[in-house]
Image (cartoon, helix red, strand yellow):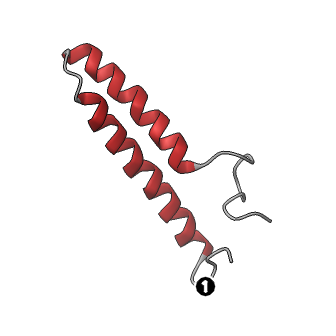
Amino acid sequence: MAEGSRGRKPGTDPLIMGLIFGILLGVVLSTIAGQWWWIVVGVAVGAAIGAGRISADKKKRGPGSDGT
């Protein structure tokens, strides 16, 4: 079984999905506020969400299961 494929569709990467979510959030906030830098904030939030999902997935698998 491929690393990280358990419980998700093949080809969905939590980091990429988090970044897409962050870009969308940033664009919406940027449109509302009229300031471009909200896009950067959205991408940072999305990356944090993606990294958190990866960390939680690794924690669920337990120690010693690094996928190698």
Residue displayed at 68% across by 77% down: 68
Left or right placement of residue 30 versus residue 48 in this view? left
Residue type marked 1: Gly
Where is 2 relative to 19, above or below? below
Left or right placement of residue 64 versus residue 43 in this view? right
Dot 1, how many residues are within 10 Å of its Cα: few (below 14), some (14-19), or many (20+)? few
Left or right placement of residue 20 versus residue 30 in this view? right
**Residue bearing the label numbered 1:** 64
Q: How many numbered discs sit on the rendered protein?
A: 1
Residue displayed at 43% across by 57% down: 52
| Residue 22 on image: x %, y % | 40, 35
Q: Secondary structure at mark 1?
A: loop
| Residue 12 on image: x %, y % | 65, 45
**Dividing the picture into quarters, in which one does residue 63 lie?**
bottom right
- Image quarter of the N terminus: bottom right
| Residue 16 on image: x %, y % | 53, 44
| Residue 44 on image: x %, y % | 32, 44
Query: Residue most toward the right?
Result: 1
Where is 31 relative to 24, above or below? above
